Amino acid sequence: MTDPDWSHYALETQAIRAGQRRTAEQEHSDPIFPTSSYVFASAAEAAAKFSGQLPGNIYSRFTNPTVRAFEERLAALEGGERCIAVASGMAAIATMGFGLLKAGDHVVCSRGVFGNTVLLFQNFFAKFGMATTFVDLTDPAAWEAAIRPQTRLLFLETPSNPLTQVADIAQLADLAHRHGALLAVDNCFCTPALQRPLELGADLVIHSATKYLDGQGRCVGGAIVGGRELLDKEVFPFLRTGGAAMSPFNAWVFLKGLETLALRMRAHSENALGLAQWLEAQPWVQRVHYPGLPSHPQFELVRRQQTAPGGIVSFELAGGQEQAWKLIDATRMLSITANLGDVKTTITHPATTTHGRLSPDERAAAGIGDGLVRLAVGLENLQDIQDDLLRWTVA
């Protein structure tokens, strides 16, 4: 059967059907190919595939049918031509960086990114002569002022982690392209179910598949989505040589996760909005950060750029770390973990976990105070989540 053009189908259909190629066994569910290598009909065929003259599987470090199915499905969901799947979300950023950048190149990155992303740019890319300037996510003038003749890449997360600040992707894409640079957007918090950066002008989309793409906290993986020429010529060669491969089993788990992505993201958003509204009414909460609240500074932009606000809610307590830890430790149902994107609600203290390796000055610049608590709102009953958050008030 010839593969249909999945661009003509709705996202919910793409998430279930795109990328699957049935074998001679005529299986209904996607198969797993747990093999390290492949055989060739002849020495000539092997030579043609190794040289790239003939397409086909060579070695599962960079060619595997299950991984390819996940890549094709996620590319369809994001509206991209090509996807490269890798071992983790951080591996996706590293593979993108080492594939695209060289010594002397410059990156402009938003401050409100995951703590390890800051360290990757600041401590490791710098070792290879790639400089990074960090700017406020929502300040277009700061982005423009930071650009140099050597600037090759603008990188951001939107919404940001953990304050859920939102950048105008179309505006930053225009800025990047006017200066001959690329725009890469980490779409982990929204997924293509809620936001499609490529349609807004971005060149690359980064994913930690570990999070919402999986949806149940089972496996670690990452992905880069964008144009075929850019990824094939500049990024894929680094994966082939560098070896940050996604395992076939993990790719199969992510394929299963994508099938329910649209349903889950709508449910996460509904629960998170209800919880954020409830938190705003609590006397012990100083401030709530959630893109679906009218109090959010980019509320109108969110309504234009996203189809729903997402599942991440952060809030601030006046009592700093002591009060934040007391609230977290009093919970009995919520999972105390820094991971997110699970059907289970998770709770963490960013200043001492996800951003704990940053200096106090770096955390302050990113707006991450000691009283900040981050929730990744799951799919439990909303009243049960609220009741668990109230335990600390009677402890």
Image: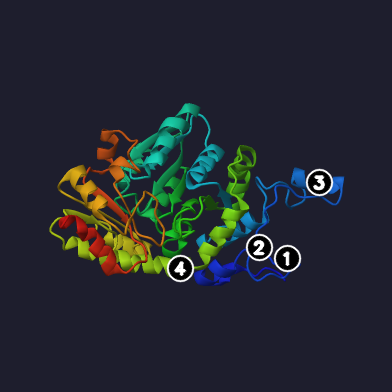
Q: Which residue is mark 3?
A: 46
Disc 3 or 1, which lies upstream in sequence?
A: 1
Q: Which residue is mark 2?
A: 31
**SS at mark 2 in the image:** loop
Query: Which one is in front, 179 or 94?
Result: 94
| Residue 262 - label | 4
Q: CA distance from mark 3 to mark 2?
A: 24 Å
Q: CA distance from mark 2 to mark 4?
A: 22 Å
Q: CA distance from mark 1 to mark 4?
A: 27 Å
Tell me if label 1 and label 2 are in contact, CB under 8 Å.
yes
In percent of width and height, residue 380 lies at: 35, 67
Pick the quarter of the image with the N terminus: bottom right
Disc 3 or 2, which lies upstream in sequence?
A: 2
Disc 2 or 4, which lies upstream in sequence?
A: 2
| Residue 23 - label | 1
Query: Which one is in front, 342 or 48?
Result: 342
Asked if residue 29 can be seen in this view, the reply is yes
Residue that lies at the very extreme toward the left in this rendered image: 283
In percent of width and height, residue 347 lies at: 31, 53
Which of label 3 and label 1 is nearer to you?
1
Q: CA distance from mark 4 to mark 3?
A: 41 Å
**SS at mark 1 in the image:** loop
Which of label 1 and label 4 is nearer to you?
1
Disc 1 or 4, which lies upstream in sequence?
A: 1
At label 4, which amino acid type do we have? Ala
Q: Relative to 3, say whether 158 is above or below.
A: above
